[in-house]
Image (cartoon, helix red, strand yellow):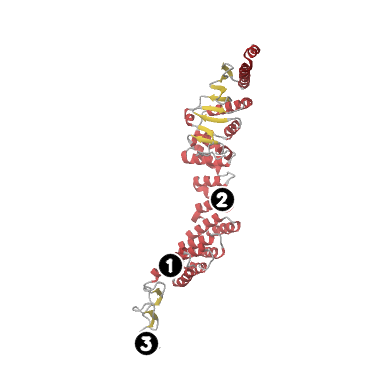
């Protein structure tokens, strides 16, 4: 029959006839694919516009050609109503994904829409694997309760169809969201475990599945997950915090563990962690230790901070100066005065700011000299001027025998006028010296 059509119509008819033959061939290949997947064919269209419909249980599959004449597969299944709001599409450069599952390979490919707790519960390791592999065969779009794969070559239909059916079955399963989140908190991918645990804590804090997930997370191989669990398990978390603080596996995690322990961390252990952090270059942990020492306010803490102030660079010396200022111990003054001679601008500023609180008259001249050496640096000039003013305000009205700053010239010294033979500033001529009116020896 087809041969006769070709002879009568000539070249144009030949193209048309071969198009029909191609459609019949497509339909046969599609039919073989659905039958091999255990589906029953319920409808087949003409070869001119090939379309096939098949079913298995309550799941329906339609295979047809799209606008680009390439095959497209649509899978519909009786999914739970809440899945109607879920969408999984190719990642867009224009609109980056807002929700991240925590699996970088998956997150780089797909743009997710819908409730975060539902998506995290739905996208376990096997589902992500299926979605990733089917996306290699064409352009995958999941929305409005449909799985749709388009822009795929003909030869990919037999490979993509079983994957889509498996995804459809997984989406159709009843889902206990907290339980699924707890199961996914044991995912092979660290980021996925972390994301599922966070949403369990946020949305299902009192659910038994959350308590069980947290218990398991306390022994997770990743320190950031153990840290998250330790925050939620109360007194049981103290041992985990201590282990993380001393372990120094991840600097940021150890720093947070130190801060969480705070004053519960004895001075000796804080000093031990600080020394190791300095040796290994864990600067965040070192800063956290400095802050804890500062809040303790002990003499031993002041000595340790002063040692860091003198010996350490990389911003830690400036941090130590700030903490010493917050403690307000006069014992810190000599080290802070010495720090005014540093080549580091941040350290000189931090030392000047600290001397605002702990400085005495002994700091006034070094502060002035620091300002003069850095007269082009406005930040240092402001810090030293403010420090001198603060010291002046503390020293005015000193008791007999104490030093104070003259009212007329900030930074000048005077001695109390009561005892004979002492020096004072003339009240009428600021800055001049005179002997007291007492008897001469």
Q: Kindly give the residue lying farthest to the bottom in the view shown.
A: 441
Rendered location of residue 270, percent (x, y): 54, 58
Quadrant of residue 32 in the image? Answer: top right
Q: Nearer the viewer, residue 107 or 399?
A: 107
Tag 1 residue: 385
Q: Nearer the viewer, mark 1 or mark 3?
A: 1
Disc with the residue nearer the chain's start (3 vs 2): 2
Horizontally, residue 23 falls left or right of residue 290, namely: right
Rendered location of residue 431, percent (x, y): 39, 77
Element assignment for label 3? loop
Q: Residues within 10 Å of mark 1 (few under 14, many from 20)?
A: some
Q: Nearer the viewer, mark 1 or mark 2?
A: 1
- Residue shown at the point (52%, 30%) measured from the top left: 142
Tag 2 residue: 244
- Circles 1 and 2, Cβ within 8 Å, touching? The answer is no
Tag 3 residue: 439
- Circles 3 and 2, Cβ within 8 Å, touching? The answer is no
Rendered location of residue 140, percent (x, y): 56, 30
Rendered location of residue 309, percent (x, y): 53, 64
């Amino acid at each position: 029959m087809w041969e006769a059509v070709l002879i009568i119509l000539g070249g144009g008819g030949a193209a048309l006839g071969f198009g029909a033959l191609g459609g019949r061939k497509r339909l046969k290949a599609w039919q073989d694919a659905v039958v091999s997947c255990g589906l029953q064919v319920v409808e087949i269209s003409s070869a001119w516009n090939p379309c096939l419909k098949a079913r298995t249980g309550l799941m329906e599959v339609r295979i047809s050609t799209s606008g680009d004449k390439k095959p497209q597969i649509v899978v519909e299944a009786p999914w739970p109503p809440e899945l109607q709001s879920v969408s999984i599409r190719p990642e867009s450069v224009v609109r980056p994904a807002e929700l991240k599952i925590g699996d970088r390979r998956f997150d780089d490919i797909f743009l997710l829409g819908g409730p975060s707790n539902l998506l995290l519960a739905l996208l376990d390791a096997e589902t992500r694997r299926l979605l990733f592999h089917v996306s290699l065969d064409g352009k995958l779009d999941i929305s409005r309760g449909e799985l749709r794969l388009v822009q795929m070559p003909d030869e990919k239909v037999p490979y993509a169809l079983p994957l889509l059916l498996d995804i459809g079955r997984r989406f159709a399963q009843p889902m206990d969201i907290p339980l699924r989140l707890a199961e996914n908190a044991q995912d092979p991918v660290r980021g996925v475990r972390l994301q599922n645990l966070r949403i369990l804590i946020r949305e299902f804090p009192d659910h038994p599945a959350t308590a069980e997930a947290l218990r398991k997370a306390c022994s997770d191989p990743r320190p950031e997950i153990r840290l998250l669990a330790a925050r939620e398990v109360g007194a049981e978390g103290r041992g985990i915090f201590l282990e993380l603080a001393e372990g120094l596996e991840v600097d940021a995690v150890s720093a947070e563990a130190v801060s969480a322990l705070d004053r519960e961390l004895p001075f000796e252990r804080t000093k031990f962690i600080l020394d190791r952090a300095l040796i290994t270059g864990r600067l965040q942990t070192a800063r956290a230790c400095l802050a804890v020492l500062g809040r303790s306010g002990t003499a031993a803490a002041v000595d340790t901070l002063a040692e860091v102030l003198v010996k350490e660079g990389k911003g830690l010396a400036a941090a130590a100066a700030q903490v010493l200022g917050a403690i307000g111990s006069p014992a810190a003054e000599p080290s802070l005065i010495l720090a005014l001679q540093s080549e580091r601008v941040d350290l000189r500023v931090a030392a000047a700011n600290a001397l605002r609180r702990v400085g005495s008259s002994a700091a006034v001249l070094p502060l002035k000299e620091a300002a003069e050496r850095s007269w082009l640096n406005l930040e240092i000039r402001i810090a030293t001027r403010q420090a001198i003013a603060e010291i002046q305000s503390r020293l005015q009205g000193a008791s007999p025998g104490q030093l104070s700053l003259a009212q007329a010239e900030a930074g000048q010294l005077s001695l109390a006028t009561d005892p004979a033979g002492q020096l004072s500033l003339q009240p009428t001529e600021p800055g001049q010296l005179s002997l007291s009116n007492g008897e001469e020896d």
